[in-house]
Amino acid sequence: MATACRVLEQLGHTGVESFVNSGNLLFDATGRTAALEKQIRTALEAEFGFELTTFVRIRRQVQALATDKPFGTIAAGHTHFVLLTLTPLGAAERKAVEALSNDLDEVRVVGRDVHWLIRDKSSNTSLTSSAWSKALPGNPSTARNVTMVERLVTKL
C-alpha cells in the first residue's frame, strides 16, 4: 500500500493515505472520475506489472454508500456489501443485477452502485463471481462490506 500511495503522490495527488490495507486509498484530486481512474490504473499497472482495475468515488458517493440503507436495519448475522462498478449500469445491467435476488441474497441498484444483502455470513452467499460477471458483462466490479465503508467515512 505504501508503494500505491507513492504512485498517487507522484501523479500530483495530495493527502494520500491507505485505509486498513484494504486496497482503498484516500486522496485529494481534481478532474473527472473516469480520467482519474484511467490515470491511476495506468500508473499502478506500470509500477506493479499487472492489470489493476481502479474505482474512484468522490467523498459524497462514499458517504452515500455508508448511509444508504435500502434494506433497513441489518439483522445480526446478516452481511451488507456494496458493489462498485467501473461504469454506471445501463437498464439491461440493472435488470440483470436485481434479478440475482433470491431468498438468501437480495440485490438493489442504488444510483451508480449495487447494495447486496446476504441473509447469512458472506461465505454462505448463493451468488458466485460467475453470476456477477454474467449480470455485469464487461463491467468490472469490486465489493466492500458496508461496515468497512462506514469506518472509511470517518477518515474523510
Image: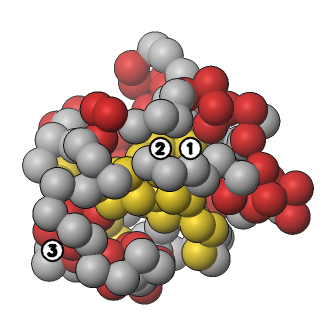
Marks 2/3 in contact by CB < 8 Å: the verdict is: no
Depicted 39 relative to depicted 108: above or below: above
Q: What's the mark number on residue 142?
A: 2
Taking the spot 46% from the left edge, 79% from the top edge, the residue there is: 70
Q: What's the mark number on residue 99?
A: none
Q: In what quadrant of the picture does the N terminus appear?
A: top left
- Could you tell which of marks 2 and 3 lies nearer the N-terminus? 2
Q: Secondary structure under badge 2?
A: strand
Quick one: 20 or 101, which is closer to the camera? 101
On the image, numbered disc 1 is attached to which residue? 141
Taking the spot 80% from the left edge, 59% from the top edge, the residue there is: 95
Q: Is residue 86 visible?
A: no
Task: Point out residue 6 in the picture as x, y percentages from the top left corner.
Answer: 25, 42
Taking the spot 68% from the left edge, 58% from the top edge, the residue there is: 98
Q: Secondary structure under badge 3?
A: loop
Q: Residue furthest front?
A: 103
Relative to 32, 20 lies left or right: left
Taking the spot 72% from the left edge, 42% from the top edge, the residue there is: 136
Crowding at mark 1 (Cα within 10 Å: few <14, some 14-19, many 20+): some
Name the kind of residue labelled 1 in the image: Ser
Quick one: 124 or 25, which is closer to the camera? 124
Depicted 64 relative to depicted 98: above or below: below
Task: Point out residue 76 in the picture as x, y percentages from the top left corner.
Answer: 14, 63
Crowding at mark 2 (Cα within 10 Å: few <14, some 14-19, many 20+): few
